[in-house]
Image (cartoon, rainbow, N blue to C red):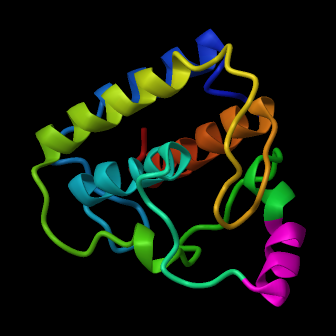
Amino acid sequence: MKSLFETESFQEITSRIEKLDEQTKATWGKMNVGQMTKHCQIPFEVINGTVKPSFKVGFFKKMLFSMMKPMMYNDKLWKQSVRTGKEFIIDYEVDFNQEKTKLISMLNQFHDRKNQEVWDPHPIFGSFKKEQWGKMQYKHLDHHLRQFGV
């Protein structure tokens, strides 16, 4: 799996985001392109600690999420229209150009952390190594960019 900490992969994702415009249509799912760019910001906000899950992560959920954790960064593509947590759902209209600019800014800030070795744990999945964070963020963006044909 590619990583956003690799310069080539980072540039590839940035280029694909730049190809999006207000008329870009999804090939699956419910979001429009503006909603998708807003949605893709939320994992970066989770990393920064500004978005936290609204539910308690008890023992059972921790066990379930620990089994799912490798799917977040492995080489297997995510299924189309896979369900997401309510914190990640964008079902309202947004300004596409503003959200695209914010997403690229967040992407740049994340890439700039490529030398950071210590990361706070994910509020649901727990600890990730730097390499896993980079792969997970690449995989999420790649999933949605494929959703919009770029």
Relative to 97, is 57 on the left or the right?
right
Q: Quadrant of residue 51?
A: bottom left
Relative to 45, is 99 on the left or the right?
left
Residue 100 x/y as whole percent = 24, 38
Relative to 26, is 35 on the left or the right?
left
Q: Is residue 40 visible?
A: yes
Residue 60, magenta (yes or no): yes
The structure residue drawn at horizontal position 42% and vertical position 54%, both measured from the top left corner, is 42
Query: Does residue 37 sit above or below 91 in this rendering?
Result: above
The structure residue drawn at horizontal position 68% and vertical position 13%, both measured from the top left corner, is 115
Residue 146 x/y as whole percent = 50, 47
Residue 139 x/y as whole percent = 64, 44
Question: In the rendered image, which quarter contains the N terminus?
Answer: top right
Assign the magenta stretch its main secondary structure: helix
The structure residue drawn at horizontal position 10% and vertical position 50%, both measured from the top left corner, is 95
Question: In the rendered image, which quarter contains the C terminus?
Answer: top left
Residue 18, magenta (yes or no): no
Relative to 62, is 121 on the left or the right?
left
Query: Does residue 119 sit above or below 126 in this rendering?
Result: above
Q: Is residue 22 visible?
A: no
Which segment did they paint magenta? 58-68
> Between 111 and 142, which is closer to the camera in this rendering?
111
> Between 37 and 59, which is closer to the camera in this rendering?
59
The structure residue drawn at horizontal position 31% and vertical position 67%, both measured from the top left corner, is 31
Residue 138 x/y as whole percent = 61, 37
Q: Quadrant of residue 133?
A: top right
